[in-house]
Image (cartoon, grey):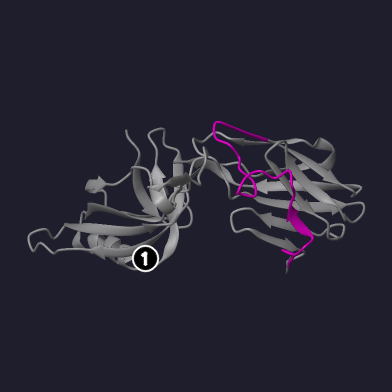
């Protein structure tokens, strides 16, 4: 069985089933930006370098039909689908091995043409707006104590993950110095005070920093001279990265939340 898109909703178990009878779906990759910049004189500069460029937002369309044992059951499926038009949620893909992947999308339209003789079936053409992202696979969320550094952040997908959420919670004392380093690639530093038991949350995808819930994206937060990439943290595909924690706190816990990344 090949992979196909089959549900739309916040969780796979509770998501709304999409029309799949005689379905025709776009399941290819996103288009990526070229990274090329045109210069005077007809010359070009490869601003993207050798790294993979980011995908662009795109429109995904597919057709499929609902079939039901009764007109009432068919109407129930149609009403559930129509209620989702305009909403933003997770679009789910069922893989050949029965695992699931998802990405955020907005259902833009659910077009239908009525066939009077098809009272137990109804075809739809669906249009989803896919946001610049990737398909999320297995949940890699975990945590480790300060003493366990360095931490291995795995990614068994086929593309880098750049939207991890990192949460530092000191214990035993406050922290006034805190850094995360991937040797030769990443160094994130925060020199503000994080009180014992409170959380410093660094969202690498949204590029936001919160200290005990308050905005902390200030001069205290920096990407140091040792930081060599555009993203805050890139967890490489088919492997992962080793993250070194350095802090003056007596103890504490670093938590990370992200999923495997798939093109």
* Percent of width and height locating residue 204: 63, 53
* Percent of width and height locating residue 60: 32, 53
Asked if one can make out residue 163 in the rendered structure from this viewpoint, the answer is: yes
Asked if one can make out residue 13 in the rendered structure from this viewpoint, the answer is: no
Q: Tell me if residue 16 comes above or below residue 182 in the rendering.
A: below
Magenta region: which residues?
Answer: 215-241
Residue pointed to by mark 1: 84
Tell me the crowding category of disc 1: few under 14, some 14 to 19, or many 20 or more residues within 10 angstroms, Cα based.
some
Is residue 223 inside the magenta stretch? yes
- Left/right placement of residue 203 relative to residue 211 reads left
Q: Main secondary structure of the magenta part?
A: loop
Res. 109 image quadrant = bottom left
In terms of depth relative to the viewer, which is nearer, 67 or 124? 124
The number of numbered discs placed on residues in the rendered structure image is: 1
Which secondary structure, mark 1? loop
Q: Tell me if residue 262 comes above or below residue 176 in the rendering.
A: above
């Amino acid at each position: 069985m090949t992979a196909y898109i089959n549900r739309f909703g916040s969780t796979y178990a509770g998501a709304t089933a999409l029309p799949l009878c005689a379905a025709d779906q776009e399941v290819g990759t996103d288009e990526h930006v070229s990274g090329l910049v045109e210069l005077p004189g007809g010359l070009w500069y490869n601003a993207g370098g050798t790294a993979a460029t980011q995908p662009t937002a795109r429109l995904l369309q597919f057709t499929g039909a609902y079939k039901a044992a009764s007109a009432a059951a068919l109407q129930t499926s149609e009403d559930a689908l129509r209620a989702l038009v305009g909403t933003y949620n997770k679009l789910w893909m069922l893989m050949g091995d029965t695992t699931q992947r998802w990405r955020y999308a907005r259902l833009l339209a659910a077009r239908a043409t009525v066939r009077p003789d098809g009272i137990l079936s109804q075809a739809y053409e669906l249009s989803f707006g896919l946001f610049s992202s990737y398909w999320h696979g297995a949940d890699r969320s975990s945590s480790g104590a300060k003493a366990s550094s360095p931490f291995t952040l795995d990614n068994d997908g086929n593309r880098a993950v750049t939207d991890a959420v990192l949460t530092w919670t000191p214990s035993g004392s406050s922290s006034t110095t805190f850094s995360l380093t991937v040797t030769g690639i990443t160094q994130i530093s925060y020199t503000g005070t994080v009180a014992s038991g409170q959380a410093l949350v660094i969202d690498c995808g949204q590029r936001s920093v919160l200290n005990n819930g308050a905005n902390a994206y200030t001069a205290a937060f920096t990407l140091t001279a040792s930081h060599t990439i555009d993203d805050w943290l890139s967890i490489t595909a088919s492997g992962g990265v080793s993250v070194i924690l350095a802090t003056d706190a007596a103890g504490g816990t670093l938590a990370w939340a992200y999923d495997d990344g798939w093109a």
